[in-house]
Amino acid sequence: MALNTALSGINAAQSDLNVIANNIANANTTGFKGSRAEFSDIYAVTGLNLSSTAVGSGTYLQDVAQQFTQGDITTTNNSLDLAISGNGFFVVNDGSGNTYTRAGDFQQDQNGYVTTTSGAKLQVYPPNGIGGFDTSTLTDLRLVTNQSNASATTQLTMTSNLPASATVPTNAFSTSDSTSYNAATPVTVYDSQGGSHQATVYYVKTGTNTWNANLYVDGQDAGTQALTFDSSGALSSPTNGVLNFNSVTLGNGSSPLTLSMNVTNTTQYGTAYSAGTITQNGYEAGTLSSVNIDSNGIVTANYSNNQTVQLGQVAIANFANTQGLAQVGNTSWSATTNSGPAVMGTAGVGQFGSLQSGALESSNTSDTTAQLVDMIQAQRNYQANAQVLSTDNTMTSSLFNAISR
């Protein structure tokens, strides 16, 4: 009996060593979660009321329990590297269903999809078209690499001060005669194809507290609009503060350019002319320059024309019993009846951990010192059980020798 009992101990120690060896082998595996060998004793009662004299029959491996403790977070220079601090898993899909991982070393494939190193696609909530995300469905995250469309300028906003002390020009207004206007402000505008054009607003004082704003685009006259100020220097006309100019045909195949100009904050004070804030709402076509993922998992594409597009929000999954998840390799798990269904959400909300871009979660077995201590203990258990085998063999040999005399 002692032989079988010691053999069960040797097998248990070997299983323990195998688990520890796997933990050490994955000390540098991103997002890896180590395991722990758990054992139970073998005990059989041979009859009624004989438990006080019954002897155990050894041990056996009852479970290899996964340890979902947090790994260290290390920073990287890759915006597609993601790390979860706290509860939750990334959701990925390999074409046969969703699996779950803590390994955030994602990359872009040849079709623009964000994938794991094994090719499973990262799942996100798609934009809902009204500034949020549709959390009722999941989709593959795909980085839009085509150009951002151009947008024609339709509105200018200018904040200027026109000098109250300015004199009315004696010469008729002409863009080629600098004495025929009091001030000029240039601004770049864009047509429907994204082409840039030079627009200039020429200010001409016409009388006490009255001015004309003359708009020219690439030298073409877009019309004249009047401005009136009150005695305190504030704009009184137009009452809505918006000047509407005529359309200009640019002759390059783009749509005619029609501009309005918001001058609500334009003033007429005794100081010199000054052009303040100048903005316009058009932009040229742009190419993808970078991707940003914030702490809430919102993925934003940034284009060279300073435009941004939200591509989705990273989905985070959690489970009632993470120990019940089934390992499927590639640092991934699948849901089982023991784990319960995935509870879906977003980073930083409720039970879900926070998300960090440009970082990775290290293996939680990266502290190999602790693993080596466990290995030494398992080795001693193995040696002790082997010694039991040797001792039992010696005793059996002695008995046989005594009987044979």
Image: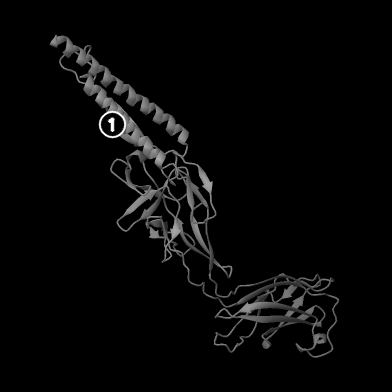
Instruction: Give whichever of 145, 105 is nearer the camera.
Output: 105
Instruction: Give whichever of 290, 140 is nearer the camera.
Output: 290
Tell me if residue 314 comes above or below residue 380 in the rendering.
below
Residue 42 visible, this orientation? no
- Where in the figure is residue 325, as x and y percent of width and height? 33, 43
Residue 121 visible, this orientation? yes
Query: Left or right: 94 with respect to 314?
Result: left
Tell me if residue 24 comes above or below residue 122 in the rendering.
above
For the N terminus, which image quadrant? top left
Instruction: Give whichever of 277, 262 is nearer the camera.
Output: 277
Q: Quadrant of residue 322?
A: top left
Instruction: Give whichever of 67, 388 is nearer the camera.
Output: 388
For mark 1, give the secondary structure: strand
**Label 1 CA crowd tier, 10 Å (few <14, some 14–19, many 20+):** few
Q: Quadrant of residue 62?
A: top left
Tell me if residue 392 comes above or below residue 356 in the rendering.
above
For the C terminus, which image quadrant? top left
- Where in the figure is residue 161, as x and y percent of width and height? 78, 72
Query: Left or right: 5 with respect to 232?
Result: left
Tell me if residue 97 comes above or below residue 46 in the rendering.
below
Which residue does the image show at 41% across and 39% down from the upper left? Answer: 24
Q: What residue would you read off at disc 1?
A: 62
- Where in the figure is residue 267, as x and y percent of width and height? 77, 71
Which residue does the image show at 29% across and 56% down from the upper left? Answer: 96
Q: Residue pushed farthest front?
A: 405
- Where in the figure is residue 127, as x and y percent of width and height? 45, 62
